Image (spheres, coloured by chain):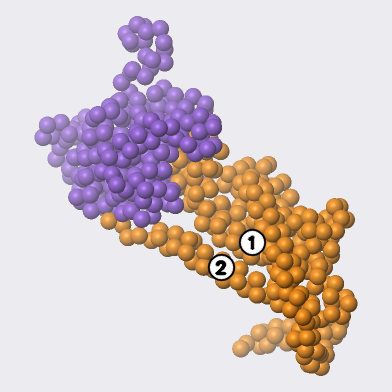
Amino acid sequence: MTPKNNIIIGIIVALLVIASYNVDANPIDFVEGLPNLLIILEEIVAVEPKYIPTALWAMFETIQMAFIGTVVGIAIALPLSMLAARNLNSKFVYAPIRALLAAIRTFPSILWALLFVIMVGTGTFAGVLAIIMYTIGFIAKLQYEAIETIDSDPMDAVGSIGVSKVQLISYVVIPESASHLLSQMLYMFDYNIRQTSILGLVGAGGIGFYIINYIKFFEYGKAAIFMLVVLITVLVIDWVSVKIRDKYIIKSQHGMDVPTK
Amino acid sequence: MKQIQMTTNPSFSLISTKKIIQMSDVWTSYDSKNFALEGINLSIDRGTIYSIVGQSGSGKSTLLKLMNGMMVPGKGIIKIDYVTPDMNNKKFKTMMHTIGYIPQSLGLIKNITVLDNILIGALPRLNKIQSLLKKFPENEVKEAKRILQLVGLTGKENRKVYMISGGEKRRVAIARALMQKPTILLADEIVSELDHVTAHEIMDLIIDVQKRTNLTAIMVHHDMQLALEYANRVAVIKDGKKILEIGVEGDNIVDFQTGDMTTEEIMEMYSDDTKK
């Protein structure tokens, strides 16, 4: 440990203390608040099981919202990512598209939701629109980066046949970047389910709408049941997407290392 | 010249002339100081096999890229069937459809099947709707399967490219080029990493196709022995300059560049070159 490192660590610790004081982040409050969890636990046990079907239905609605948002978002993001890739376009094409995508990404999904609640009113549609916007910004960026890293040799070889740019994209770029895309789609869907679960906080539908309302009326037990459903669903979806990834993506990537004759 | 006067279609007369590729005082550079090629002159007859031999970095691959329009020379004139190779030239872009190019890395698409890779050679012949729907007409699929058989890949059409061996990958790359119905085939070190037997199998295959279709094949090689065995003419490139152009006539190796070197002198020069 050099003196220089000690100074850096000292500065970080000092900043941590000052910032915590400023934002009133007191660890003692956290410890003192722990027994409150017991109250919630007691309330969960006391909640009647009749709320579980409602919670499951709300979760199902959330999943559907995430599904629409992911599919539509990806459908819009893909052509944008083709335009934003540096190895396929001139600067005059990719630069403005990249700027647009960067602007879309600056808003977190909850701010998009707030905007769409103002535009189309409260409800699930505002949430779906918010997820679409977030997916566009995110997937387009990941995808144009994936396109830029694909092997240039197949592009050169097929390009030398004198094919059109659309043919080059559909016959070389998409197949070559497909394994990345599948992995990103799964990740995005997974992530969008978690995001959609909180969009209800601003009135944009989904299971979050129930959670925020129960909390407002101090019905912590009911809120906790709904939160538990979110937790279990996210875990299940996470597990499923890991399985899919193992089966289709990892296999195809490893398959490339076949020994030559 | 007689042929030009006899026909009313000038493009026909140009196609029927003997020289298919001509380079005159061609210079290229990657930056302002280092030249990749210096004053290259060569002319290649239609329907022959022309080999380019040289060490790594001598400029052999650059020569091929100049021939298919992927690079343009800094100075000098190149004509492929009397058209200047340039991807932005519409006339040449159409010619590219029938110039098969096999880069050293082969440039295959790994995640799709052998058959789909071969069909790529037919892409310029598809109309917009077929191309968009990825639907190749029946006759093209049939042709691809015929070529598949010709290159000895029957039964492997549905394998993904990452699942096949190095020798088989080369056959796929050749098949894709043949699918273009090429008049010119450019192959960059297509057998350099293969064992002796496989290398000869691949070369025999190319010669067989070349004889059947009167193709002009320009092949870059590392190995002079192999080049002399298969080519009508061999150009030796060293540090971006063409130092020798030779061919085999009977038992002799003939110097076509200056015309005054004997077989022994050429062999001596060649062995000196490989020692270095």
Q: Residue at x 79, y 78 (%)?
A: A222
Q: Residue at x 45, y 35 (%)?
A: B136
Q: CA distance from mark 1 to mark 2?
A: 14 Å
Tell me the mark number nearer the camera, choosing from 1 and 2: 2
Determine the image quadrant of residue A30. Answer: bottom right
Q: Which chain is purple?
A: B
Task: From the viewer's side, name the closer residue of B77 and B84.
Answer: B84
Which amino acid does the dot numbered 1 rest on?
Met
Where is residue B53 drawn, in percent x and y? 29, 42
Q: Residue at x 35, y 25 (%)?
A: B20
Q: Name the side, left or right, on which A232 lies relative to B184.
A: right
| Crowd band around label 1 with a 10 angstrom C-alpha radius: few (<14), some (14–19), many (20+) | many
Earlier sequence position, callout 1 versus callout 2:
1
Q: Residue furthest left?
A: B251
Which amino acid does the dot numbered 2 rest on?
Val
Which residue is labeled 1 in the image? A188
The numbered mark at residue A240 is: 2
Where is residue A234 drawn, in percent x and y? 65, 71
Q: Chain of mark 2?
A: A
Q: Which chain is orange?
A: A
